[in-house]
Image (cartoon, rainbow, N blue to C red):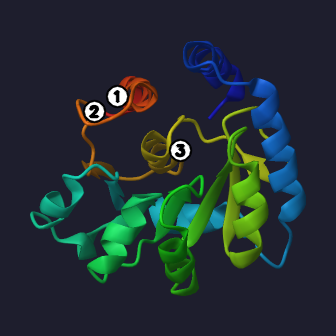
Amino acid sequence: MDFNEWEPIYESILKDMGFSREGDERAALILSGMLGPSNSVAISEIRKLVEGRDTLVCGNAPVLRDELELIDPDVFTIIAADGATAVLMDRGIVPDIIVTDLDGDVEKEILANKEGSLMVVHGHGDNIDKLEAYVPMLSSIVGSTQAAPLENVYNFGGFSDGDRCVYLAKEFGAASITLVGFDFDDLDVNPIKKKKLEWARMLIERIVP
């Protein structure tokens, strides 16, 4: 993702949501300082998993469980959005990649990580405490931000966990992107989540036909 292309969208999201760019930038710096050779991997490891592969992007809407029954997950590279990891792990499916801001079932994410999941850990202004608590428990990490990228913290595009999964798949050359566990019209959400779903729909429709 070219940050010059992403930045106007990012600024619109910040204005709409009332979020702080300064908070995001601080989180990115803190995350950057927590990553080193012992717990991080090069982004080439993502490319190995995604490029030329059919990808299954799993959101965490309640429909995920039923939609997983309709597909064969073994034919995909599986990219899980945060809380979707717990649903997958409960079915005996270890995601290839977990995209997370660490506000889901982190214990299941730690378990999946130990079983081989690559972690794309996202820093933003509201999760600095979670970064400090959980990043030391993880390995095979790629850092991400929605603000300007740093040397070891990347911006692949997208805003919330689900759409960032989709942008990751697109960025690294997935042959196809199949979505499960997405419900942009979910009525059982609070106003902030509703806005996030509206942005997720718009962002995904920009890159997935």
Task: Reply above or below: 51 against 122.
Answer: below
Label ID, residue 184: 2
Q: Position of residue 184 (x, y in %)?
A: 27, 33
Hey, what amino acid is under mark 1?
Arg
Q: Residue at x 36, y 77 (%)?
A: 89
Hey, what amino acid is under mark 3?
Glu
Badge 1 local density, few (<14 within 10 Å), some, or many (20+)? some
Q: Residue at x 69, y 48 (%)?
A: 127
For the residues carrying marks 3 and 1, which lies nearer the camera in this image?
A: 1
The answer to which of 171 and 132 lies nearer the viewer is 132
Q: Position of residue 166 (x, y in %)?
A: 42, 44
Label ID, residue 201: 1
Q: CA distance from mark 2 to mark 1?
A: 6 Å
Res 90 seen here: yes
Q: Are marks 2 and 1 in contact (CB under 8 Å)?
A: yes
- The residue at the far bottom in this view is 115
Q: Which image quarter is the N terminus in?
A: top right
Q: Residue at x 73, y 38 (%)?
A: 125
Q: Residue at x 67, y 74 (%)?
A: 140
In the rendered image, which residue does mark 3 sit on?
Answer: 171
203 relative position to 24: left or right: left
